Image (spheres, rainbow, N blue to C red):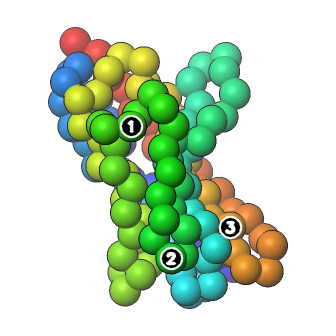
């Protein structure tokens, strides 16, 4: 059974930084086609923030380009999201997602990020 566990969320002032982590267990990350970070603000849909393929290609939502960086460490089975220059509109619950080669997809439980002074 695959488990994705996010951590690293919290309260930060505008302009600050946070690093989110997503620890994957149950299956090897080498069988993952793509991993991503999504976020959902109250009353809004869940949107893609950033994604990374098994080969390391990345893509970002326009709203976070130049501020956020997605990366992964296959040896540690961990996905990261480095978030810099945070803005109040980045406030949301952030979810980790993994899409495997057999077509199955999994979600973490989410971690709250609040950007406020």
Point 37% across, 86% down: residue: 75
Earlier along the polypeptide chain: callout 1 or callout 2? Answer: 2
Q: Nearer the viewer, residue 61 or 25?
A: 61
As helix, strand or loop, the secondary structure at mark 1 comes to loop
Does 86 sit left or right of 93 as displayed? left
Q: Residues within 10 Å of mark 3 (few under 14, many from 20)?
A: some
Does 110 sit left or right of 86 as displayed? right
Residue 85: tell me if it is visible: yes
Earlier along the polypeptide chain: callout 3 or callout 1? Answer: 1
Point 39% across, 69% down: residue: 72
Point 64% across, 73% down: residue: 33
Does 38 sit left or right of 69 as displayed? right
Q: Nearer the viewer, mark 3 or mark 1?
A: 1
- Rendered location of residue 106, percent (x, y): 69, 63
Determine the image quadrant of residue 74: bottom left
Instruction: Look at the picture and state if 45 lies above or below 72.
Output: above
- Residue 55 is tagged as 2
- Residue 102 is tagged as none
- Rendered location of residue 39, percent (x, y): 55, 37
- Residue 65 is tagged as 1
Q: CA distance from mark 1 to mark 2?
A: 20 Å
- Residue 99 is tagged as 3
Q: Quadrant of the N terminus?
A: bottom right
């Amino acid at each position: 059974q695959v488990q994705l566990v996010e951590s690293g969320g919290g309260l930060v002032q505008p302009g600050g930084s946070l690093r989110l982590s997503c620890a994957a267990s149950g299956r090897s990350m080498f069988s993952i086609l793509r991993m991503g970070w999504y976020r959902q603000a109250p009353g809004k849909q869940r949107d893609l923030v950033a994604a990374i393929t098994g080969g390391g290609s990345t893509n970002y939502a326009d709203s976070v380009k130049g501020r956020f960086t997605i990366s992964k460490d296959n040896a540690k089975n961990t996905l990261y999201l480095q978030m810099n220059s945070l803005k109040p509109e980045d406030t949301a619950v952030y979810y980790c997602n993994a899409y495997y080669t057999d077509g199955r997809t999994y979600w973490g439980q989410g971690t709250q990020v609040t950007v406020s002074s």
